[in-house]
Image (cartoon, helix red, strand yellow):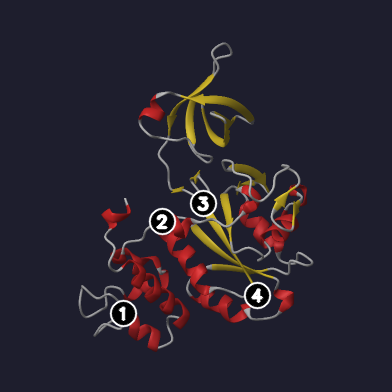
Amino acid sequence: MTGMIMKGIGGFYYVEAADTVFECKARGNFRRQHITPLAGDHVEFQTDEVKGNVITAILPRKNELIRPAVANIDQLFIVASSADPQINPLMIDRLTAVCEIKQIEPVIVFTKIDLGDAYKSYQKVYADAGFRTVAVNTQNGSSAEQVAKLLKDRVSAFAGNTGVGKSSLLNAISPQLQLQTGETSKKLGRGRHTTRQCELLKVCGGYVADTPGFSSVDTERYTFIPKEELAACFREFRPYLNECRFTSCRHLNDKGCAVAQAVQAGKIAQSRYASYKSMYEEVRHVEEWEKR
């Protein structure tokens, strides 16, 4: 049979297939090959009422995250609040870049819009760059249904700094989750610091990767983007990358740089370009093999 791993606990993996969840163990050769089954993995497994069910193969992954440990994510909701805390464009841009290289579709969600309209200029920046954006009043849940509709038939994760309103947003989408402020899940009976593996929860016709308390996804900390690939991870840069005078252009105000010219012409946002330069400086002297 084939199915998808929903969670793993204590060496057992719970695989959803044919509207049933099967408790399985992983075949021993996975450990020898240093392969760990992850929530979100599509797997082949054999059922045996006497010996127990066994996962025999993990099908090729579209992508994989380390924190949370989850595979085959379709989209990442990057949550930022209009105020308290203030919007951090570098954090958003780090995550959108990781999404691009991991083949995950980012969705930018601005919460707490009742506290001010600072989000509006940023929403325009990301919409102009080609990203889907949603603005949500987390006090009354207005526009939360837009997020709920995007969950259907997809595997999603949520990321954002502490205090941006991820729990309030998720409660507005799916009240049965009963997430409390402070990122604690009453439904699952755990606190924010509990260590455990990721679990996929069924929400609005799709699946949401549930990390402890839906804490921030640390993809930017564990995904190294080589400097040669960084510019392509900014989707609005792509039309200009082959227009630079020199093929070795770093897009750092280099002579004849089409990207820098697009920034000066207002076709690329200054904040996005500033994030690119900051991220480039972080990796410019680091070789990819050093990160392995």
Q: CA distance from mark 4 to mark 3?
A: 26 Å
Q: Residue at x 31, y 50 (%)?
A: 292
The single residue placed furthest to the front in the displayed view is 193
Front of the two marks 3 and 2: 2
Q: Residue at x 52, y 41 (%)?
A: 40
76 or 189: nearer the viewer: 189
Q: CA distance from mark 3 to mark 1?
A: 32 Å
Q: Earlier in the sequence, mark 4 or mark 2?
A: 4
Q: Earlier in the sequence, mark 3 or mark 2?
A: 3
Q: Position of residue 120 (x, y in %)?
A: 62, 79
Q: What residue sits right under mark 4 in the picture?
A: 82
Q: Residues within 10 Å of mark 4 (few under 14, many from 20)?
A: many
Front of the two marks 3 and 1: 1
Q: What residue sits right under mark 3 in the picture?
A: 74
Q: Position of residue 115 (x, y in %)?
A: 73, 77
Q: Say which element carries label 1.
A: loop
